[in-house]
Image (cartoon, coloured by chain):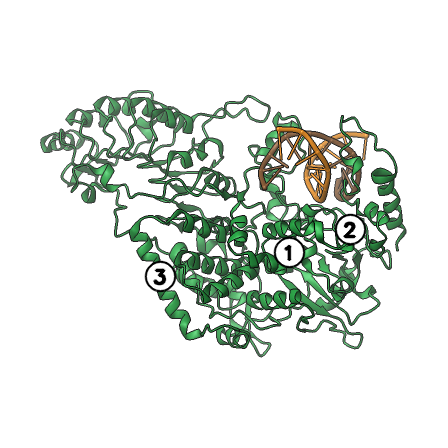
Chain colours: A green, B orange, C brown
Amino acid sequence: MAMSLIADEEDYDNSDSEQPRPLNRPKPKMGSSPCAAPGSTAGGMKLSSGRGSSSARRRRTRCRKCEACTRKECGECHFCKDMKKFGGPGRMKQSCIMRQCIAPVLPHTAVCVVCGEAGKEDTVEGEDDKFSMMLMECSICSEIIHPACLKDKDAGGVVNDELPNCWECPKCNHAGKTGKQKRGPGFKYASNLPGSLLKEQRTIIKEEPDMSTETAAVSPITKRKTEDDDNPTCKSEDAIKKRSPKLEDNPLRKKRKLFEKDSDSNSIIRKKKKRTNPDDLSTSLILGHIKKEREDDEEYEEQNQPERSFVPSEEEDGDDERDEEEEEKALSSRKENGKVSHKTLESDQSQGGLTQAGPSSTDAQSKSQRKAKRKPRLPNKELSKELSKQLNQEIQKTEDRLAHQNGRTVKTEPSSDGEDRKPLNNGSSHLRDWLGPKWELNGSLREQTPVSLIRTTTPAPVFRPTPCRSPPKCVQMERHVIRPPPISPPPDRLPLDDGKNHVLRREVWMGVFSHLIHKDLCVCMSVCKTWNRWCCDKRLWTKIDLNRCKSITPLMLSGIIRRQPVSLDLSWTNISKKQLSWLINRLPGLRVLLLAGCSWAAVSALCTSSCPLLRNLDVQWVEGLKDNQIRDLLSPPTDNRPGQLDCRSKLRNVEDLCLAGLDITDTSLKLIIKHMPLLSQLDLSYCNHITDHSVNILTAAGTTTRDSLTHINLSVCNRVTDLSLTYFKRCGNICQIDLRYCKQVTKEGCEQFIAEMSVSVQFRLMEEKLLSKLS
DNA sequence: CCCAACGTCGAG
DNA sequence: CTCGACGTTGGG
């Protein structure tokens, strides 16, 4: 044991267990606990003889390189608001949620428990050599060691891709300790985040109790739950090894089995995980399911065939397509029904939440999926599972990539115990459903043009498809950092089976991918690891359309975050405020946000979230959105704390605003004029309270809108008359005035407008009462 | 030394 | 169970 380690032990002992901790606080909270401080496990170690071989855990620290680390503090999140620099009390001492490190690293002071030296991967060439010389921290015993310093080099370790320099060391692994006991160290991610979104896992645990026994397969939170449950009964050794139940939710998202051989300089070989106990069995079975992230890109068939032998069930490949169809049928019928039973919806979200919690849950996914296959089908659930599975594979692969970027140079065991049992395109069709072209709800109207609307006499009630109100109460947000999408992910060329690379370079492929619609991209993502990486490039996902997707699951949310779209359409969905808030806070580059037909409760998330780049906001037909709500939306931050001096509206950069179908009055328009100086396109169609006076206000001298407005839609505003046209003459940049179906606007009025404007600008009637400037 | 913030506890 | 609080670690 290294001296530093011993010193650590003493330190911890002193602080944690042997001496009363000096406390200012009324309650000696931490002093009473051996697990109080990070790293205090060494204290625990001394307390427990069973932990003799374990090391003090080193607190991890930011990598300082990832996208999150390089961000600035948002100044608006919970933790930022706590910071002294933002005028808060500074008690919480947490990192900005936008800056939660993606890949926290071992501190520079970390050294090998055997040789006492730091990581030396920089001193050697070659991936395997690098691996053997880098420090690896065991997620079970916390020992930090150079793999090269291991005595028994034949023993296998399981690399945890979730964190750099993290594995289950051969000792622990060999002893049959499973990752379920520990989460990876340093995985605090967002643990203090308020408003987590993922409550559903509990539901799923209850619904599918067997999942809680699939230790390696459950999501972090599921696992946490599992472990918590296990805690009282687990053996003392394990209990001691665990620093605390809360620490234990390691999403063992993926395991890579490693084996080192003295005789082989490329010492890591691929080997199946042995099944020594039921746990292992299930683990490996499940691992088999998720093992799509292979080091080598492989043919579609190759991925599927080996795993078939593992399919214990009556499931056959031939069924999959049929199943898929069934699901789609079910899906469409569900859509037609326009509602989903609450229970089903919840289970949908449970599933989503479960999987969203982390790639490891893919295992659970697969399992539950398998299980579900044997049961009468629950289409919605199935759908969600498929979605989850698919997405998690993507996520997993993304994480792989990140792991590699972090210098992990470990070979992957290719799906040791067989691979995913389902054909790869199974499930992608569902992704298609939500990531692809919008779900159409019985051909319902999304059109904003009055042409489709005009046929109804009472547009609003008729047009508003009934989005699922009251989203499941248990919607809980993920507590994990959702990793950003890869940018130009390696490799540069597609590796082929023969060890060579495909002749085409990544950018060529990207050019091809860029022509695919999202559903096809999803299919591509299931082809091989490399394609998966490439296809997750956010350049391919600038626009994500979930219009009319009835149930927004946490899984979808994480999928969105990973793709960092510039444009997001959540119209007519049942997204909740919490979900939307969570999303917005994680999409700093969002420019287009469509929330038509959502509830005001959800849209109100915009009041507290920051989206400084937002250019295009669509809140048409949002129920309950009236003047007061517009005020809330546009009001600048109310606090005057340091760092919050910006008194401008959060929506100050909006250029295109759609307020169709809202009961807003001139009060709202005044606010808009005041707070949206860049507004150029304004849609007020179907706003029955809009009058000539409103137009007068919009075009009055001294208003910004007078000059900024280029497009105005007042169609089906029955209180607007020809008088408005005279007001529009003041607008220097107006290009289009839509007065279609305004009963009080006359053709003559329009013609007069054209005539009078012709001195400076040529307008023409594109349609009756639709005035457009000739370019 | 200071600041940032990890990882944990425990009140509610 | 959630989330505020905070001792202590890690970087500079």
Q: Which mark is residue A162?
A: 1
Three-letter amino acid code of the residue under disc 2? Ile
Query: Callout 1: residue from which chain?
Result: A
Judging from the image, what secondary structure is the residue with disc 3 in?
helix
Q: Residue A241 carries which label?
A: none
Same chain check for tags 1 and 2:
yes
Chain letter of the residue beneath label 3 in the structure image? A
Work out whether residue B1 or residue C6 is closer to the camera in this orientation and state it.
Answer: C6
Judge by depth and name the residue closer to the eye, A474 or A558: A474
Q: Mark 3 points at which residue?
A: A328
* Side of A41 relative to A196 (left or right): right
Q: What number is the disc on residue A240?
A: 2
Q: What residue type is labelled 3?
A: Glu
**Badge 1 amino acid:** Glu
Circle 1: is it few (<14), some (14-19), or many (20+) Cα within 10 Å?
many
Residue at image location 82% in from the left, 47% down from the top: A44
